[in-house]
Amino acid sequence: MTHELLFAGFGGQGVLSMGMTLSYAGMIEGKEISWMPSYGPEMRGGTANCIVIISDGKISSPIISSFDIVVALNQPSVEKFERAVKPGGLLVYDSTNVITPPTRADIQILSVPASEEAVKLKNTKIMNMILLGAILDRTHVVAGESVTRALRKVLPERYHHLLPLNEQALRRGGELASVAQPA
Amino acid sequence: MTHELLFAGFGGQGVLSMGMTLSYAGMIEGKEISWMPSYGPEMRGGTANCIVIISDGKISSPIISSFDIVVALNQPSVEKFERAVKPGGLLVYDSTNVITPPTRADIQILSVPASEEAVKLKNTKIMNMILLGAILDRTHVVAGESVTRALRKVLPERYHHLLPLNEQALRRGGELASVAQPA
Amino acid sequence: MNDFRLMKGNEALAEAAISAGCRAYFGYPITPQSEILEYLTDEGRRRGMIVLQAESEVAAINMIYGAAGAGARVMTSSSSPGISLMQEGLSYIASAELPCLVVNVNRGGPGLGTIQPAQGDYFQATKGGGHGDYHLIVLAPSSVQEMAEFVYDGFDLADRYRNPVMILADGALGQMMEKVEFPEYRVEDHVPPKPWATVGKPPERPANIITSLHIQPEKMEQINLRLQEKYRVIESREVRYEAIHTDDAEYLIVAYGLVARIAHKAVEVARAEGIRVGLIRPITLYPFPSGPIRSIAKKVAGVLTVEMNAGQMVEDVRLAVNGKAPVSFYGRMGGVIPAPEEIVRELKTLAAAHPHAQPAETY
Amino acid sequence: MNDFRLMKGNEALAEAAISAGCRAYFGYPITPQSEILEYLTDEGRRRGMIVLQAESEVAAINMIYGAAGAGARVMTSSSSPGISLMQEGLSYIASAELPCLVVNVNRGGPGLGTIQPAQGDYFQATKGGGHGDYHLIVLAPSSVQEMAEFVYDGFDLADRYRNPVMILADGALGQMMEKVEFPEYRVEDHVPPKPWATVGKPPERPANIITSLHIQPEKMEQINLRLQEKYRVIESREVRYEAIHTDDAEYLIVAYGLVARIAHKAVEVARAEGIRVGLIRPITLYPFPSGPIRSIAKKVAGVLTVEMNAGQMVEDVRLAVNGKAPVSFYGRMGGVIPAPEEIVRELKTLAAAHPHAQPAETY
Amino acid sequence: MAKGTVVFDIENCKGCELCIEACPQDSLELSPRINAQGYHYVVLVKDNCTGCTNCALVCPDAVITVYREKKKTRVPVARISGVTQNITVTIDEEGKPS
Amino acid sequence: MAKGTVVFDIENCKGCELCIEACPQDSLELSPRINAQGYHYVVLVKDNCTGCTNCALVCPDAVITVYREKKKTRVPVARISGVTQNITVTIDEEGKPS
Amino acid sequence: MGQDVVDAALEQMECVYARPDTLTDTRFHYCPGCGHSVVHRVIMEVVQEAGIREQTIGVAPVGCSVFAYNYMDVDMQEAAHGRASAVATGIKRVLPDRFVFSYQGDGDLAAIGTAETIHTCNRGENILMVFVNNAIYGMTGGQMAPTTLLGMKTSTSPAGRTVETAGFPLKITEMVAMLPGTYYVTRQSVHTPNAVRQLKKAITKSFQYQKERKGTCFIEVVSNCPSGWKMTPVQSNAWLVENMFPLYPPGDIKAPK
Amino acid sequence: MGQDVVDAALEQMECVYARPDTLTDTRFHYCPGCGHSVVHRVIMEVVQEAGIREQTIGVAPVGCSVFAYNYMDVDMQEAAHGRASAVATGIKRVLPDRFVFSYQGDGDLAAIGTAETIHTCNRGENILMVFVNNAIYGMTGGQMAPTTLLGMKTSTSPAGRTVETAGFPLKITEMVAMLPGTYYVTRQSVHTPNAVRQLKKAITKSFQYQKERKGTCFIEVVSNCPSGWKMTPVQSNAWLVENMFPLYPPGDIKAPK
Ligand SMILES: Cc1ncc(C[n+]2csc(CCOP(=O)(O)OP(=O)(O)O)c2C)c(N)n1
Ligand SMILES: Cc1ncc(C[n+]2csc(CCOP(=O)(O)OP(=O)(O)O)c2C)c(N)n1
Ligand code: SF4
Ligand code: SF4
Ligand code: SF4
Ligand code: SF4
Ligand code: SF4
Ligand code: SF4
Ligand SMILES: [Mg+2]
Ligand SMILES: [Mg+2]
């Protein structure tokens, strides 16, 4: 079983750490992992993305161009990567930041008001965890339990007091996903 | 017919121009020519040499290690290049500057007191022409006439008043060679 | 969780350098490998390593010369344009027979190009981009795990042969994170004595001289003969490669580094479709595994070489095969990574042109 | 005396550059080619050429980039270590497709080596010592006459293909004097318009940009594909070589530059002794005369490649021959020039191992 | 004081706030809305703009156009002579470009 | 004035004449003879050498050894401390190396 | 204020500042608040106002401003890292009556390109060298530059730059001012409107001097790198005044009378 | 004076000057009268007298002094052209308690090696840099150097160096003196016995400062090149005083109190 995911958004939205958390979770489950960030001057424009592959077997290329799951944190990412979702795949986006929603009919589309919810949880930084929670509800890339364990790895010691908040965000994401209507 | 010559001595003794004059003479006679100087840091020590090949046909390598004729203007050159004369070849040296004469029995050896004679002619610079004259007497690399014509090419215009002196030196060299005893 | 760590290739390589006893690092930043310098300035310095950000790659490689000549385990890293600037220095280092490790995290060229993964520096690495006859030993990792492992091996080879070793990776291997496990490695067991190093001349030995200048051609030829003899030894002893499904192969793919992984996937896909294809992954690009390739080539109907360049290693493959089988090439350039499907497609084209039934002849 | 002049190879080359309309020269002194810069500062400047002694080879090659990009016929020259320093710049120039002439008067390497003639930079010149996939067109003169002639040809090729051209000579060719005759050459007839050059943007055209950066891999791949297509055209149109006594040859020698002359002598000696041997002298080292060599190789009992290095062009010979005949190699290194007798001896060894009687098979 | 106004190319504004900092009249503010690039963009929030061009001068993205009530005439103060076209460097005495 | 003398390694002298120029006593001259390297070498031609070392100091080929009648004792003026061996830089007060 | 009101108002007014035509329409790729594009714009304003666009050739570096040619709408060449002044030399020597300028960052000009910088200035090449000093390697992700301040944290001086390992911040502008080949050497900035005005004057003068073949003009622009410095643009400008100016004080270093 | 008389006399005497043991017996390959070997000898005298031979590592350049290691009998490395100070940096960083010196000509140090020179000094590497300025490229046959004087004829300035084509003579020593990384910067010569004495003092001090980890010591030696200048050695020294000293005046440029 192989899951191929893309996380995309503005720099600072937590795109890379979102992918990294998931990667750690995969590693905890004994999977093969590949996490590949976009790098270099393209980051100047303020966009960032990373590709995560989680697999039971060997991973060939860490750079791929179509995905089972795309997570888009902003409008440009929706525009750029909607077409990169495999037919039947999943596109999750932050509806707070995205004005023109995706339109493909051959994929699952999940709209989550993640930024809005993060404001409600009083920490805009955890918007990414809300989305991650939503993904875990819809798919079974890794177990939620593994993600909470992974967070302990990814978050530097000095932020460990934020673990409960992150877990709350994950749960909230799951809730939002489970009530969301298919677009 | 191919003639392979080496001219060797201290820098400033006119080693290179001697070879160049002969090369020009060969060119005047329509021959193929190759003139190859030693170059680079080995010149620091104050020694210089050049290889001249004059041939009716194409010349292969401009760098060779045995010669029909070696002209040695100083002691180190005699020591270094005596062995480079082909059996039956000719070694000409300036006896004024060479204390320990060459000893090989399988080659012609011609000792010319060139520096001494140059002093007599009141211009130490033409020592090399005396030796060239001596070679032309002993061998027939080019015609003496060609060398005098070549001098006109090699000597910059402003030195053309020295042409008669050079010709005199060539002649003197020829005379010295014709009276010299085989060593 | 066991001893695995999730790390970028560049970081894994840097971490390995520290634990391999690399004494000093000199380098200049360049994408996609600046993490090596960054990791070492931080973690490396903390663990006692000397780390200097040089003013340029030219300075860096000459600092390496000095430090290696002084007997230290040293390393530098860069990416394509920066490695080009090191060519004079590399030729000097190879000629003076100084052990060191040079990492090239290859990006798309020529010129400034892109910063994406590529393999366009194969010729430069294996044939000698600098002047004169010399060879680097070239190791090509294909995973983050190997980015780390080959550092130990690289240093050991460098010391064993007094020869510069290059790890030739690519931008993807440098930037991606994978699981990595670091081996046990006792530095003391691996670094040989270096009696030739310039450390200050005690009365009992003549002065040690590190030089690549031998102004007499005959002397320089002797130096060259000695180097060539060393290369023959390296060629006979140090070839490393991985052979996958080659036993029953009717076709052979040759690919290295990241591309070998993709080719591996292609092999699986093709085999599922009934094409009996094998894969040779050269691990040492110099010395090149010509022998293994030649012997397999004799038995197959065709060889496909896949690279992220316009066709470079394929020349070494052709030289190895020497007409015993048709050799075709597929390449992507400028930072584009081939997909497994593309490779399968190429393989089918090759198979169509050279069905195995055909009597063995030469091409 | 006719129109012949007796000149050093370096001087003849410099004189040719002036009359080929070379607008500017940028270079740094190095033995054995400093006479080029010296001749140009003197005679070149007198005849209106811009001559600048750069602070280094790195600066020189980048000045070439600028001046070529501004539309001028330009050239630089150096010798092995200096050429190594130019590798980054050459990769940029090739990628940005700027026409220029680069002269390498090869000396013995690797490292500082010697200053004597050698051919150790063949790989660097032909495979690309810089990073990424690119090619210089490489011309190999073998006489002072050709040192001059190839300058005209070189500039024309550079302009025709917007590609850097290298003249790869050696120290002996640079330093020796031979007769040379300069052809008629009207510069106006040869320099094409360069609408792409950066000369200042008039309102009616978009700005001209000289760059080698294309940050999107797909774009960079397109650039590479265009380059590769150009190289295929060059390979099909611009191969130059000399074939001597190949019609009835039972053995074939392949050699270039100065060595080809020595090999020519060896051919004569061997033929006098009854060995029917022919000679192919590649004049363009890139594009390499693979076709001619391949077709002759099919008919001979063996091929001998002779070089002043440890065996570089021999790989291209082997690739051309592709197993159709045994290929052997003889080389001298470090500035040592092989003698005709040595070549004859090698030839006899080859002939003994592979007498022609033997049925044609593959090796 | 002169009366002026500014117009923003909001799609290219990156919300860096340097113009806000530079405006002596405190006329500018970030919009709570974001543009398609994801940036909060700048808007003119007061009617006191003098058209001093300060904001435009510091704007890294050159997205500001400044208007002012007509009155001044330009004084050429520098001239680069001898090029093909007429060249008049029109920096006025106070150093403001015009 | 001290009495001194100098000894030349004539085979390595290159006849550059710098020692002749440097000798305050005019004690040196080029020999009319040449050595095996082809150079006229230097010889001491007067009996007035003071052993001042001037000639040796400027000799590029380090072929001059200088002797002087015994008298002075050395005064160490500089010391590079802390290295493994005893280091005494023996430049005397007038700056002459000893 | 509605759009109609604006439009009406604008009719009564004259445009006193607009993006110059010599800039293309391409959106700058720089991070928000980055000084690079201000410098680009000011150069292009001068080129426009001086009417020398047809005679102007620029040279872009490798650094964040590597794409300068996408914005400055004049003929341009993209040089290898550090070699912009050598490339500019090549251009200027063969086109001596064109206006040639190079544009470089601190890594480019003062680290890898040190030799080219010094020798271009020493030869007094008749070009304008623009040097944007943001005390960091912006493009490659915030490594230490030769001009990085002591104590300043970068990704390759995580504990702050120290003299022991990395030496001193390099005042290369003062060094080139020492060379007789330079005619006009000045240090400017773009952190305030007035600073921008000053820079524009300096650039205008430099092109005038170039016309008069006076020698090398060299303008350092002390600038910011909000991303590399990990600050907001506004903070970065304050930090620049407080920390950069003491070591790199703005003003003319060498100016003709 | 017969040999026996000499021998007898010598017995009454003490040797006050002899070729130091730290020089090998190899005959110098330099042209007659060349200053290089004087500098070699003086460095080795200091190494001998300071007793630091076992701790000393030298770096030779590419230039006429490329074979310096054949004469100076200490551990040495031969660096690529221009890179001696980078090589010395590499050595010193891994062997910080050794005495490391580099030795370079003007082409090596001030042309191709400019960047390495400036940055080595700027980092304040604890080494001694010896810089032999003979205003010409001796080794390659007399080409113009960065330090060649205006009007001076060389094989690449056959009509004399002009500012227009080649710029100004580069006073790199003054430049490195500006850098806070250098501790002691001085200009010396070897054209007279006293000059040689002064040089020896400067070298002695430099090793002492190196011991104390004070930073870079930089000694320029204004020297001759009789072959390149086409003069006799004696003429060359006179020419040097008359023509080189006005631009390159001997003396300390930066000296600790
Ligand atoms: C030869 C070479 N070395 C290194 C690099 C990587 N590189 C690109 S830009 C840069 C430095 C950029 O810093 P700076 O010049 O200060 O410009 P900034 O981005 O700060 O404006 C480096 C090291 C390269 N492209 N080429
Ligand atoms: C990369 C490189 N470029 C050029 C040369 C040729 N070269 C050797 S020495 C030298 C200059 C020597 O001049 P300088 O440094 O002043 O030393 P000098 O001989 O005058 O003592 C040059 C250009 C080289 N060996 N390597
Ligand atoms: S023009 Fe002046 S007053 Fe108007 S908004 Fe801009 S800075 Fe403020
Ligand atoms: S300065 Fe420009 S980019 Fe920045 S906020 Fe203001 S208008 Fe927007
Ligand atoms: S020691 Fe003094 S006096 Fe004696 S020869 Fe030498 S310079 Fe002259
Ligand atoms: S200085 Fe030395 S080499 Fe020169 S002439 Fe005197 S003894 Fe001979
Ligand atoms: S990284 Fe720094 S210099 Fe580069 S664009 Fe961003 S702010 Fe500007
Ligand atoms: S060429 Fe000049 S520097 Fe070189 S050894 Fe001769 S005199 Fe000395
Ligand atoms: Mg910067
Ligand atoms: Mg010099």
Image: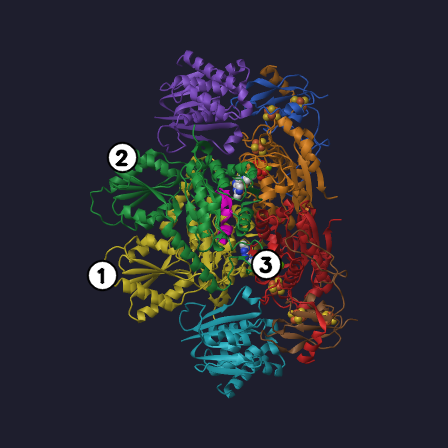
Chain colours: A purple, B cyan, C green, D yellow, E blue, F brown, G orange, H red
Q: CA distance from mark 2 to mark 1?
A: 42 Å
Chain assignment, label 3: H
Report the residue at 32% width, 63% height from top: D278
Mark 2: give few (<14), some (14-19) or many (20+) Cα within 10 Å.
Answer: some
Q: Which residues are magenta?
A: C73-92
Judging by the rendered image, the residue that carries numbered circle 1 is D358
Q: Determine whether the beta carbon of the residue marked 1 sits less than 8 angstroms from the nearest atom of ligand 2.
A: no
Would you say B29 lies left or right of C51 here?
left
Which x, y percent locates residue A110? 42, 17
Where disc 3 sits, the SS reads loop
Image quadrant where one finds the N terminus of chain C: top left
Quarter for ligand 5? Answer: bottom right
Mark 1: give few (<14), some (14-19) or many (20+) Cα within 10 Å.
Answer: few
Judging by the rendered image, the residue that carries numbered circle 2 is C271
Q: CA distance from mark 3 to mark 2?
A: 65 Å
Residue H51 occupies which quadrant of the picture?
bottom right
Judging by the rendered image, the residue that carries numbered circle 3 is H74
Report the residue at 37% width, 65% height from top: D263
Where disc 2 sits, the SS reads helix
Q: Which is in the foreground here, disc 2 or disc 1? A: 2
Chain assignment, label 1: D
Against C59, is D281 above or below?
below
Whether discs 3 and 2 lie on one chain: the answer is no
Question: Does D325 appear in magenta?
Answer: no
Where disc 1 sits, the SS reads loop
